[in-house]
């Protein structure tokens, strides 16, 4: 049987294959070797940066018209008044807004930062201690089981944790744990913030505790994996030099993974700053006032946005919605500032030398 005739090109010449096959061959030749990996890596590094820039630019454009109207007073005021929705809108400085509309973000800033600080104060030592116990004290099987339950805690939906905080955890803490503290704490400049009626458990303290519960699995699991990477020889050498287990952990193990622990804390801080549903359920969600003590109701940027979004969508002028966009922009700036500060701290920590011997 005779061979089949060769394929013709567009110019009628023989010897060239079909167009799809030639295109595939050209692509394989183009992306052969390390070039494909290099391009994929560049795209993977560029996409997150572009996404962050797109989000930041979108928030700036959405909130641009109200930035000048609210001004710096927005960061120092406690007012939160959407205005009279049934009255005729008014125009001030080229910005149309409901009559009497006035917004201040100071309670939101205080609530966001205070609840996150409370969460980290509780979560960081508990997480590091739990990681050390899992790695260095518990048997391998028991440590693996405890670590598995720790990671399962991180996967619980925040709405479930928030509901548990409203129905069980918050009332228990306010009635049986901090009620004596609130009644007997002396009225001095710092301790007075722990004095006062504890309420029903909806407030700043409960929000910080709930955030700590949500942050602990993130920091603890990451710290556990980091401690497992510490070589055995430096720890055995520290013990041979006469260090106790506590000194070995404080002077060798933790400094060895210090930069990674800082990164884990930053991950937990990001979760605490941006947590929405759980905080909206347990904070009391009160706007327009600052908490007088750690038991008072409060709100955060994320909780305010989710609680006020429905009302903002009903504002025909769009002023309320643009103000919420400004709140989101401030929260994003706070989060980015925390991450940049933590990265600078990581560079400082990673450049420190490891101590050797007792007393260094």
Image: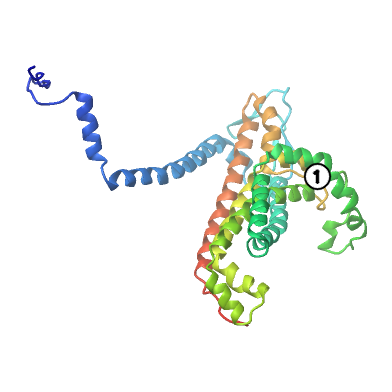
User: Residue 283, image x and y in percent?
Assistant: 77, 43
Mark 1, residues whose alpha carbon is within 10 Å: few (<14), some, or many (≥20)? Answer: many
Residue in the picture at 52% in, 62% down: 344
Q: Give the image's coloring scheme.
A: rainbow
User: Residue 12, image x and y in percent?
Assistant: 7, 19
Outermost residue on the front side: it is: 1
Apparent side of residue 32 relative to residue 121 in the rendered image (left or right): left
Can you say whether 333 is above or below 347 in the image?
A: above
Between 100 and 134, the residue placed more toward the observer is 134
Apparent side of residue 239 relative to residue 207 in the rendered image (left or right): left
User: Residue 333, image x and y in percent?
Assistant: 57, 48
Apparent side of residue 259 relative to residue 359 in the rendered image (left or right): left
Secondary structure, mark 1, is loop
Residue in the picture at 72% in, 40% down: 278
Can you say whether 74 is above or below 24 in the image?
A: below
User: Residue 218, image x and y in percent?
Assistant: 62, 51
Between 287 and 28, the residue placed more toward the observer is 28
Residue in the picture at 74% in, 27% down: 84
Can you say whether 64 is above or below 7 in the image?
A: below
Between 136 and 73, the residue placed more toward the observer is 136
Q: Quadrant of the C terminus?
A: bottom right
Q: Which residue is mark 1?
A: 297
Q: Quadrant of the N terminus?
A: top left
Residue 101 shows up from this direction: no
Q: Quadrant of residue 10?
A: top left
Apparent side of residue 186 relative to residue 278 in the rendered image (left or right): right
């Amino acid at each position: 049987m005779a061979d089949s005739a060769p394929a013709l090109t567009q110019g009628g010449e023989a010897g060239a294959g079909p167009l799809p096959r030639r295109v595939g061959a050209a692509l394989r030749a183009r992306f052969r070797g390390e070039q494909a990996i290099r391009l994929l890596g560049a795209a993977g590094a560029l996409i997150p940066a572009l996404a962050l820039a797109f989000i930041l630019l979108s928030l700036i454009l959405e909130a641009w018209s109200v930035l000048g109207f609210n001004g710096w007073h927005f960061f120092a005021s406690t007012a939160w008044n959407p205005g009279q929705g049934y009255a005729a809108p008014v125009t001030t400085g080229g910005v149309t807004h409901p009559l009497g509309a006035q917004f201040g973000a100071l309670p939101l800033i205080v609530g966001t930062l205070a609840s996150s600080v409370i969460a980290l104060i509780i979560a960081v030592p508990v997480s590091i201690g739990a990681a050390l116990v899992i790695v260095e004290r518990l048997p391998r099987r028991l440590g693996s089981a405890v670590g598995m339950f720790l990671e399962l805690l991180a996967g619980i939906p925040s709405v479930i944790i928030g509901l548990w905080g409203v129905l069980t955890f918050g009332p228990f803490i306010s009635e049986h744990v901090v009620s004596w503290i609130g009644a007997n704490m002396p009225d001095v400049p710092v301790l007075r913030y722990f004095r006062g009626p504890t309420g029903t458990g909806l407030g700043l303290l409960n929000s910080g505790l709930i955030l700590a519960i949500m942050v602990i699995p993130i920091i603890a699991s990451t710290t556990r994996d980091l401690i497992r990477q510490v070589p055995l020889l430096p720890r055995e050498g520290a013990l041979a030099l006469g260090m106790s287990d506590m000194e070995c952990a404080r002077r060798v193990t933790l400094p060895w993974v210090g930069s990674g622990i800082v990164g884990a804390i930053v991950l937990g801080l990001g979760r605490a700053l941006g947590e929405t549903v759980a905080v909206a359920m347990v904070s009391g969600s009160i706007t327009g006032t600052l908490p007088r003590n750690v038991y008072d109701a409060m709100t955060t940027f994320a909780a305010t946005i989710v609680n006020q979004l429905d009302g903002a969508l009903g504002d025909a002028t769009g002023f309320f919605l643009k103000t919420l966009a400004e709140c989101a922009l401030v929260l994003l700036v706070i989060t980015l500032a925390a991450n940049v500060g933590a990265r600078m701290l990581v560079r400082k920590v990673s450049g420190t030398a490891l101590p050797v011997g007792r007393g260094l």
